[in-house]
Image: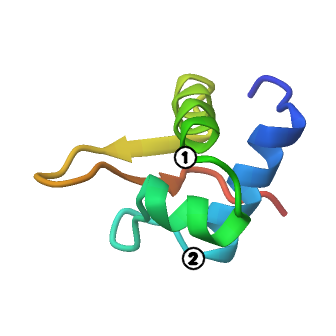
């Protein structure tokens, strides 16, 4: 996996803290935004970057997409 910038590290850690570590416990961008207290645009752009880097998976749903961590950092 490519190196992560500070925002990507924060969002990844937030997803882990929220328990989004498998497809049965996905979280939305709004969940992440509330937990890490960052603007929604920043959170959304960072989630897209993390998906492209293969760190998280995006699950399309009817209302809002959900995300979960693919490889939990040890």
**Residue at horizontal 57 percent and vertical 61 percent from the top:** 32
Residue 25, which numbered label? none
Which of the two residues, 40 or 27, is positioned nearer the viewer here? 40
Residue density around tag 2, few if under 14, some if 14–19, many if 20 or more, within 10 Å: some
The residue carrying mark 1 is 40
- The correct choice, above or below, for 68 with respect to 54 in the image is below
Q: Is residue 21 left or right of residue 61?
A: right
Q: Is residue 74 left or right of residue 20?
A: right
Q: Residue at 55% of width from left, 36% of height from top?
A: 41
Question: Residue 24: where, in percent of width, then height?
Answer: 33, 72
The residue positioned 79% from the left and 57% from the top of the image is 73
State left or right for residue 62 relative to residue 40.
left
Give the quadrant of the C terminus: bottom right
Q: Nearer the viewer, residue 44 or 53?
A: 44
| Element type at mark 1 | helix
From the top left corner, tell me how far across and down residue 55 is, in percent. Answer: 62, 39
In the rendered image of this protein, does residue 54 appear above or below residue 56?
above
Q: Residues within 10 Å of mark 1 (few under 14, many from 20)?
A: some
Q: Looking at the rendered structure, which numbered label has been put on residue 19?
A: 2
- Up/down of 37 relative to 35, above or below: above
Position of the N terminus, as image quadrant, is top right
Q: Secondary structure at mark 2?
A: loop
Residue 42 rendering spot, x and y as whole percentages: 64, 37
The type of colouring in the image is rainbow
Q: Position of residue 11 (x, y in %)?
A: 70, 51
Question: Left of 23 or right of it: where is 56?
Answer: right
| Separation of marks 2 and 1 at Cα, in angstroms | 20 Å
Q: Which residue is drawn at the image coordinates 71% and 63% (left, top)? A: 37
Q: Quadrant of residue 17?
A: bottom right
Q: Earlier in the sequence, mark 2 or mark 1?
A: 2
Total marks shown come to 2
Residue sitting nearer the eye, 15 or 41:
41
């Amino acid at each position: 996996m490519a190196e992560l910038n500070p925002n990507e590290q924060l969002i990844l850690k937030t997803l882990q803290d929220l328990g989004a570590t498998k497809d049965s416990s996905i979280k939305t961008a709004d969940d992440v935004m509330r937990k890490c207290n960052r603007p929604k645009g920043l959170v959304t752009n960072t989630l897209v970057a993390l998906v492209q880097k293969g760190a998280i998976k995006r699950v399309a749903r009817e209302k809002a997409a959900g995300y979960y961590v693919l490889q939990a950092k040890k």
